Image: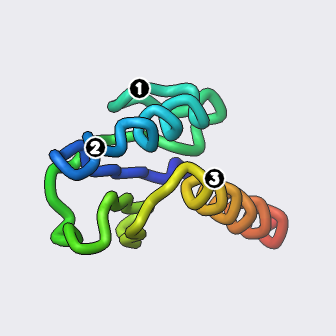
């Protein structure tokens, strides 16, 4: 299963373009692309209704605010760990 990542490339996020660039580098993809391992797809969205806690990112319908490069890395690692655990328990 591929996890869908949806950051917001709006005016607030553009002020934090380094965060967007970090996400693209970390996953080695551009918007509308899927990571080489097939785990993550990066899709831009324009409103998640979370401006007060932006920049925001949605992972599989779960909203995450106050996104930073460090927080992004932590979320990706946690998402990968959950997927690995689920795959191990189904074997």
Which of the two marks, 3 or 1, is nearer to us in this view? Answer: 3
Image point (45%, 32%), residue name: 21
Residue 14: x %, y % from top left: 26, 40
Residue 36: x %, y % from top left: 61, 27
Which of the image's four quarters has the C terminus?
A: bottom right
Above or below, 34 relative to 63: above
Which residue position holds label 1? Answer: 30
Work out whether residue 34 or residue 49 is closer to the camera in this orientation and state it. Answer: 49
Dividing the picture into quarters, in which one does residue 38 lie?
top right
Which residue position holds label 2? Answer: 15
Farthest residue toward the front?
15
Q: Secondary structure beneath disc 3?
A: helix
Say left or right for 21 vs 31: right
Sequence-wise, the earlier of marks 1 and 2 is 2
Instruction: Give me the disc on residue 73.
Output: 3
Sequence-wise, the earlier of marks 2 and 3 is 2
Which of the two marks, 2 or 3, is nearer to us in this view? Answer: 2
Q: Secondary structure beneath disc 2?
A: loop
């Amino acid at each position: 299963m591929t996890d869908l990542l949806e950051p917001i490339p709006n005016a607030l996020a553009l002020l934090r373009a380094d965060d967007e660039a970090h996400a693209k580098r970390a996953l080695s993809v551009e918007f509308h692309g899927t990571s080489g391992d097939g785990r993550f797809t990066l899709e831009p969205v324009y409103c998640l209704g979370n401006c007060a806690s932006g920049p925001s990112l949605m992972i599989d319908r779960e909203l995450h605010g106050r996104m930073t490069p460090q927080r992004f890395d932590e979320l990706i690692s946690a998402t990968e760990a959950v997927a690995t655990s689920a795959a191990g328990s189904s074997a």
